[in-house]
Amino acid sequence: MPNPGNVTRPVTLLGLGRSGTTLMSKTFARHSQFQSCDETGGLIFGVWEGSKQTFMPLDVEDWHLADKPDEKAAFYVQKTLAATCPSDKPRWFHKPAGIPFTYMDFHKLPGARGPVTQIPVEWYWTVLRKTFPEATFMTILRNPFDVAVSRMQHTNWKPVDVLQSAAKYMEIFLYGRDHFDLVLSFEELTDDYEASIRRACLAAGCDFEPGM
C-alpha cells in the first residue's frame, strides 16, 4: 500500500514540524493494517506540476485524461506513489510535508492565496483533494512560537525562517479547515497520548491496537 486499489484513500496528516507529526506517523506504522509512507510532499506536489510539463503516453483506457490537466496530474501522482511505496498492507498513512516551493515559482500557481504569505492555498488543496478524493485528513496544532523554540533547539534554523514557514502552513490549514476529519492539539498528545491515538483511529475508521 498504496496500490492502484486504495491509493486514493490514505490517512493524511498535516501539521507543522515539531508538533508531533513524526510521532503520529511512527504510531500508525505500528498498526497491523497500515504502512506509513512518511513525508510525501515533495513527490506529490513535484510530480503534480511536473506532469503538466512532461508528455508521457497514456494507455488507451486513460486517453480521456489527455485534455484534463488536473485529473492527469492526479493520475500520475497516484501511479508514482503506488510504484515508490508499495506494500501488501490494506491501508496507508502519510504526511505530505516538504512542499518543494524552493524549486517552484508558486506565484504562477492558480487560485486563492493566503492573505499574508501569498501561499497558493487553493492550489494546495486542489492537489490533495483531487489526488486523494477518499482521504481522511488530520492535523495536529501547536503554538507556532513553541514550534519555533523547538525547531531552534533541534536545527540551525533562524527564528524568522521558522515563523515564516509556520505562517504559510497555518494559512493552508485555515483555508482547508472544513476538510479535516480530526484536529488534535499538541497539548492533547502530551497530556494523554493513548486517548489521542484512540481518537485518531476512530477518525480513520480502524481499531486501536495496543502496539501503537
Image (cartoon, rainbow, N blue to C red):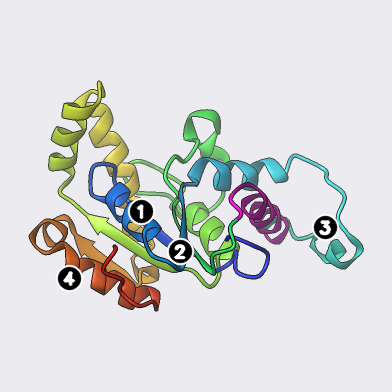
Q: Which residue is mark 1?
A: 25
Q: Amino acid at mark 3?
A: Ala
Which numbered disc, 1 or 2, marks the residue closer to the eye? 2
Q: Is 32 situated left or right of 141 in this image? A: right
Q: Which residue is mark 3?
A: 66
Tell me the quadrant of the picture where the C terminus can be found.
Answer: bottom left
The x and y percentages for residue 138 are: 34, 64
Q: CA distance from mark 2 to mark 4?
A: 19 Å
- Is any atom of residue 111 visible in this view? yes
Q: Is 67 situated left or right of 139 in this image? A: right
Q: Residues within 10 Å of mark 3 (few under 14, many from 20)?
A: some
Q: Which residue is mark 2?
A: 34
Q: Amino acid at mark 2?
A: Phe
Q: Earlier in the sequence, mark 1 or mark 2?
A: 1
Q: Residues within 10 Å of mark 4 (few under 14, many from 20)?
A: few
Q: Which residue is mark 4?
A: 195
Secondary structure at badge 1 equals helix
**Magenta residues, as a range?**
71-86
Q: CA distance from mark 1 to mark 2?
A: 10 Å
Which numbered disc, 1 or 3, marks the residue closer to the eye? 1
Q: Which residue is drawn at the image coordinates 37% and 49% (left, top)? A: 114
Q: CA distance from mark 1 to mark 3?
A: 35 Å
The x and y percentages for residue 131 are: 59, 61
Q: CA distance from mark 2 to mark 3?
A: 33 Å
C-beta proximity under 8 Å, tags 1 and 2: no
